Each structure stands twice: as C-alpha cells, then as structure tokens.
Amino acid sequence: MIPLLFLASVFALSADTFGAPTEGAPISGQSIPLLRRNSSPREVADWGALAKSQRNSLIAKYGSQTTQKRSSGYNLIVDQLYDSGYYGSLAIGTPAVSFDVLLDTGSSDLWLAGSSCGTLCGSSATYNPSSSSTFQNLSTAFEIQYGAGNAGGYVAQDTVQMAGFSVSSQGFAVVDVVSQDFLTSPVSGLFGLAWNTIAASGQMPFWQTLASSNAWDSALFAVQLTRYSNDTSAQELEPGGVINIGYVNSSLYTGSIDYIDIPGTPSYWYLPLDSLTVQGNSISISSGTTAAIDTGTTNIAGPTSAIQAIYAQIPNSQPATGDWVGYYSFPCSTTVNVELSFGGSTWSISPADFTVAQTTSSECIGAFFEADISGGSPTWIIGDTFLKNVYSVFRYNPPSIGFANLSSIAIAENGAGGTVPSATIGTVSAAVTNTSDAPRGHALSTSLSILFLAFSVVLLL
C-alpha cells in the first residue's frame, strides 16, 4: 500500500515535463505531477521484512470479500520505514489546507490523519476539523485493525480540491488513533481511486463524483509513473510522473490507447488477463483469470502455480527463504523479459522493473511473487512493476482500462531528477457538490491481519 499509503502537487519545473495539457487540451482537464518516494538503500534483512509484509497484506487486502464492500476497509500505511510509492497533494477544508496523499487505484476511501492524532502521527501534517467552516462530522465510526497495529477515527465530510476541481460535502475518514510510527512524513493519508462499491466509509470517491457529474471533458483519469529503481544515485524524493484528470495527454504516449472493458459491476479496476510470457515462453493462464490494476502496490502477485512456472523459465532461479518466502531469487546477470496481454494487446515489462532487490553479489529477487487469493477476488494483482512501462487510462463510462506505449518524452523522465515541491493549493476551475446516495449512516468496523504494503523497488546495488 504501498504497501500502503500510497498519490498531487505542482513541480517547480516546466509544466510540459510532467504532462500538463498541451495546446488544444480540454480546459476542464487538469494534470497532477506525482512525487515518487524512494527508500534509501537498506540491509537485506530489512528488505526481506518488507517483502513479507507486502505479501501478507496483499492477501489480506484482496482475500476477504465476504460482503459487497471491502469490509476490511483500506489504509496504505504498514511499515512506513520501508515505504515506497507515488503520491501527490490535495487541499481540504475552508479555508483550504494542502496535504500529501498516496493515490491508489486499489482502494476507494480518502482518509487523513486528524489533529487529535498527536505524536502517534509523527511529523506528518494533520487535518484540523475545527479550522474548517465546511466540516461536518457524520458521527460514523471508522476503525481499521492491522496485524502490526491499528488506525481508527470517524467518517466526515468537507470540501476537497484536487487538480483544479472541487467537491463540496466530500466524504472521507479522519483518523485520530494509529499505531506508533504508522505514518511517515510528508504523507498524511491515502486517496482511493477505485469504485464506490468497495468504499469502506460508504462514501462516493472524489473522482467518481466528478466523473458522474460531467465535470470533466472526458470522464477518465490517466497515470504516467517514472522509474528510479535502476538509478543508484536516486534521492529519497524524486519527480514521479503525472496523473491527468479529465483528459489524456497525447505527448505522453504514442499510438492508440487500447481499452478493455471491466467485467461485471465495477469495484476494483480489474481486467481479464489473456496471456503471459517469460523469456518468450508462454505461461499457462486459467480461463477467466482476472487481474487488478493497482497503483497502490509496487510488485506483481499471482497464483503459486503460475509464479513457479515463471521462474522455471529463468535458469538457476529458486524459491527464496526466510522473510522472502513466496518470492524467488535469480542470477542478477540474467536479463528477464516478461510480456502481459490484455484484450489482445501485449505489453512488455522492462528488465529493470523485474528486479526488486539484490541479496548477494550475484543473486537478485524477482518482482513476481506468490499470493493465492481466495474469496472471488482478482487472482493477479498488477502493480507499478508493470504500470511504469505504460500510459494507463481509467475510464468511467464504459468502465474500462486503457493502455498505451510511453512516448519518448515520458521515457526521458525516468531517472531525470528535478525539484521536489511541497503540497500546494491550486486554482479551482470546476466545482460540484457530492449528492450521491452512498450509505452514510452505518458504523464501520474493519479488520485485517495486515494491509497491503507496496515496497520500494530501488535496487540494492
């Protein structure tokens, strides 16, 4: 969630660099530059602990589908000392105050650390309800239990702004009780970008309110993520790409955008996975296999049998041990080529993204790991290991996901560095009121053994 916490602010660089609208772009479409938070190199044991946490929390995140909603709630904040993700900023309240949040297409709830959180929230900026004239407490409990701790608070409403758009009476959760060291500055919360059907708070997501209100020229948002995993000089904070809201930026991709419809009632952003090849060899995929497209996790999880088949194509690979159980090691000297196919189109993963960490002078850990998810959820979870290689578009109607090849402009941003800004408050160009009929009166009690932790893919070289 990155493994949890995990996405907008304006960089002090050329707007074109981050995919701002070029000439002719819709006025109502806006861009949000993203920041990538990289972890500095750590001991192998630390990486192993993080890997274990990510795998366990992913299974918990997608494996508890006993009700229509994700009854476990959603929080992207497990073990933040080993956190890595893409985040940006939003502004909330009247007068508006800005906060850094992780943007996650694998969840649907917005939550922020509240001012009553105290020292438990560390040095992260906190939201003060008493400072906003538009705040409304809905008196609905919000509680999340983790194997490594807990977070709790209540559901509320306030005016929320992002990328030039404003939604009044936007539902979100104010978290005022968290386990020690649960948050790491500057991130103050999480911004879910999936559908309202899995919103633990019962509130309509910000993006969905705007899309359904015809506030955007095009009812969609698009994401481009940068790569620093193979940059040994990467800093803790680096420019992370952009999320375009209400339009697609043609300067960031080439060719056409291939859309694939979401099967059934939208919940997660998931697609049928048609095929997968490793080193040019096909991996058996069961009929009807679905994959969640999740910016909130770094790597890629799949069924044990398929993951075993993947590494069988990589000579001298073997199951990892200890905290790395579920992952596989392989010779760092091996260049691994992986391709995924959705809707008849095939997309490649850079070998640089296949490597998660280097554990010895010659052994590396691969980005694909075992996670047998039950409960009718998607059987594959496709995270940033894949998404850094494509321009991804998430469309409201018809509910669908589109992929396109990155342009040379987008590719040039990988490892380019740049000025990293603080959270900012932009100018509102369009405003709507949340009038959805999403449930607002039921108490929420959520329980997870541990939430989804997406970890850094900075190479330990």
Image (cartoon, rainbow, N blue to C red):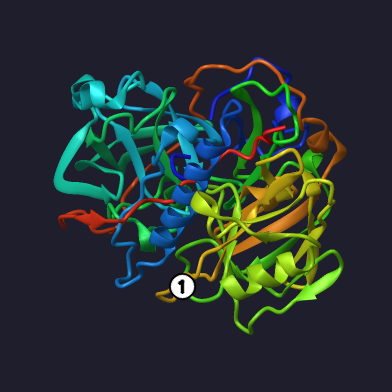
Judged left or right of residue 287, residue 453 is: left
- Circle 1 sits in a helix, a strand or a loop, which is it? loop
Q: Is residue 461 above or below residue 173?
A: above
In this picture, residue 216 sits left or right of residue 333: left
Which residue is rendered at x = 61% and y = 18% of the image? 420
Query: Which residue shows up at 53% across the image and 44% down it?
Result: 48
Front-most of 357 and 126?
A: 357
Q: Position of residue 185 (x, y in %)?
A: 42, 23
Report the quarter where the C terminus lies: top right
Tag 1 residue: 265
User: Quarter of the image holding residue 227?
Assistant: top right
Residue 296 relative to residue 15: left or right? left
Q: Amino acid at mark 1?
A: Thr
**Viewer-closest of 77 and 387:** 77
Q: Quadrant of residue 26?
A: top right
Residue found at the far bottom of this picture = 287
Q: Is residue 92 visible?
A: yes
Tell me what residue is drawn at x 48 percent, y 62 percent: 268
- Camera sees residue 133: no
Closer to the camera, 202 or 349? 349
How many marks on residues? Answer: 1
Q: Residues within 10 Å of mark 1 (few under 14, many from 20)?
A: few
Is 330 situated left or right of 98 in this image?
A: right
Q: In the current view of this chain or complex, which residue is farthest to the left?
A: 139
Residue 87 in percent (x, y) is at 53, 33
Residue at the (19%, 42%) spot, across then down: 154
Reply above or below: 157 against 234: below
Q: Position of residue 138 (x, y in %)?
A: 16, 44
Name the foreground residue: 405 vs 376. Answer: 376
Residue 292 % position (x, y): 55, 63
